[in-house]
Every structure is written in C-alpha cells, then in structure tokens.
Amino acid sequence: MTPNILLTGGSGFLGSALLNNLAFKEAIVMGRTQPKDYNNFVSRTLDSITNYEDILCNIDVVVHAAGLAHVMDSTSQKAMDAYRNINTLATLNLAEQAMAVGVKRFVFISSIKVLGEQTKKGRRYTYSDKLNPKDPYAISKAEAENGLRELSAKSAMEVVIIRPPLVYGKGVKGNFERLLKLSALQIPLPLKSIENKRSFVAVENLVDLICTCLFHPKAKNQVFLVSDNFDMATPELLNLLAIAGGYRSRLFSFPDRILEKLLMCLGKSRVYDRLCGSMEVDISHTINLLDWQPPVLPKDSILNCWPDRR
C-alpha cells in the first residue's frame, strides 16, 4: 500500500523531480510556492512557530526537502541566523509535530557538507564519520540532524537522513549551472592538469533512493550517503558537459600550484577549492543495506542538464 506522503520543497529542483515520480503522484505538497501544474498543495510557511498538525494528522511519511541553500555573505552571523531558522528550527518544529500526531517516518534531505568541505587523496566520507561542518549552511544541517536523532530516540517515529553531494540534472541551478555556463563559454580554461576526484549525484538517482527510503524496513533510523557511484575529476566532468552540450572542450594544462596562488591573490580561494579539491563519498553502506544501485548513468543525466542542447 502506498503511504500517504507529505513533501516540503515541492517547487524546488529536487522537489519537482520527486513530483514526477509515481510514488509522489498523490503526495500533499506543503510550502509557500505551489509547484507548477500540481494542485494537491497546502500553503503554509515553514518556520519554527507555524502549526502543521491539521496537515500531518493523516500522513505516514514526511519527506522534508525544503531548505535554505544560498545566502549572500554566507559567512556572516546574519547568514547563520537565516540558515538556522529554516534548516534547523523549522525542520525540528515540523518533525516534533509529525512525531506528536503519529507520523511513521521522517525523511530528511541533509547534505554531504555536514562531514566537511573536502576529502584527502585516497579517503572517502562514510556514513559513520563524525560531523564536521565548516560553513553556516552545513552547520544548520548538522544541527538539524542532531535534533532529529534526539527526537527519534524518544519516539516511535523513524528518521531517515540522506546526505547528497552536488546534485545535477534537468533544471539544475547553483554551482552545477555555473559549470554548464563555464563549458558553454568556449574559452580556454587552465584546468586540464587537475587530478582531483569528486562525487556527484544525478537527480534521478537521488529521487530513486528517496523513494526506496519511503517504505524500506532497513532504512529505519539510518543515515545514507548517495552518489552516482562514479567519481570524476573536474577535467573529466567539464569534457562530458562540453560534449553533451555540443561544444568543443578547450582545457589546457597549467601548474596546479600556480593556479591556486593566482586565485588566492584574486580572492577566489573558494573557487579553487570547488574546482580543484576532492570530495568523494562511499555509498557501500547504502548499496548493501538497501540492496540499491543508482539506476541512471551520469552521461545520460548530463545530457538533460542542457536546456537547449545543440
């Protein structure tokens, strides 16, 4: 029997992809913005004080995909407060009320960034690693995870935490959209010599895992890392993006240390970290416990990233 599902963040990138899945065909979507062409929607602000019990009373599973991801001047105290209000306090308010009315399972979409910003060569993040968030966004997600564990420990409501790395697919925004634009510029880029490794996840694969976690008995009170299980270096990814978009890859070799110093002098150290740093995740726990495999290959999802493929 299909569980009664409440989805938050239905108008976002991930939420829109979830609503295209049959498992969410009759889901109730709650939030401030109604998803396009979806009528089973309840307008309600996500914050630390709003009451949701009238919506939650007949719900079996909450999938909490809403959250704040991008704030200007993201290292300031004001940004920290903004992230904490939405990603932490609103999450725990919703979860506490879900627990009170007897919701069976709460699926929280967290972030791999709760474990840190980079992995060292030959090292991958695992599901059992200690939390080590570095920026306000990651801190707010980590605080939400800790709060959810505390709630789960004193109730019958099961909590499932999913930590994706950078998500990509049709309609992608944010950092991956910037990579698309970089590939489309058709200018030479000094990135061919980069030897990092990064994990990514196609939105189709993330949706598939979320759907698995709706009902799988072994997902109870578990933390899952997710990826395509196909890590790539930045040059490899940019080459794939260029080819998928019908462009010619224009990467050239350049000493990594000089590139790092140049970007540092320009105040772009974080750009260097995102382009040249490694961020690998180990999803063996997810695969083994749930008997799950990413169903979509990266090359197929990357094709869908281009809005008007040439």
Image (cartoon, rainbow, N blue to C red):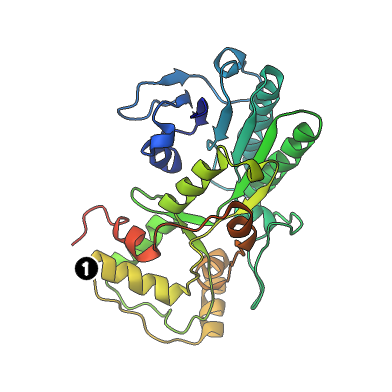
Q: Residues within 10 Å of mark 1 (few under 14, many from 20)?
A: some
**Viewer-closest of 80 and 42:** 42
Residue designated by label 1: 246
Position of residue 80 measured from the top left corner of the image (x, y, whole percent): 66, 42
Q: Is residue 110 found left or right of 15 in the rendered image?
A: right
Q: Position of residue 6 (x, y in %)?
A: 52, 27
| Numbered disc total | 1
The residue at 48%/68% (across/down) is 230
Residue 294 vs 233, above or below: the answer is above
Residue lying at the far front of the rendered structure: 1
Question: Is 293 rendered above or below residue 50?
Answer: below
Q: In the image, is 292 to the left or to the right of 303?
A: right
Q: Looking at this view, is 69 or 34 the one in front?
A: 34
Q: Is residue 49 among the parts visible in the rendering? A: yes
Q: Amino acid at mark 1?
A: Gly
Q: Is residue 287 left or right of residue 81?
A: left
Residue 267 visible in the picture: no
Residue 1 is situated, as x and y percent measured from the top left of the image, at 50, 29
Q: Residue at x 60, y 38 (%)?
A: 107
Name the residue: 61% across, 45% down. Answer: 110
Question: Which residue is at the front of the view, 219 or 111?
Answer: 219
Q: Secondary structure at mark 1?
A: loop
Q: Is residue 295 left or right of residue 264?
A: left
The percent position of residue 240, horizontal first and vertical second, equals 34, 71
Which residue is at the front of the view, 74 or 176? 176
When the figure is inspected, residue 44 is found, relative to residue 225, above or below; the finding is above
Q: Farthest residue toward the left?
A: 310
The C terminus appears in which quarter of the rendering? bottom left
Q: Residue furthest right?
A: 154
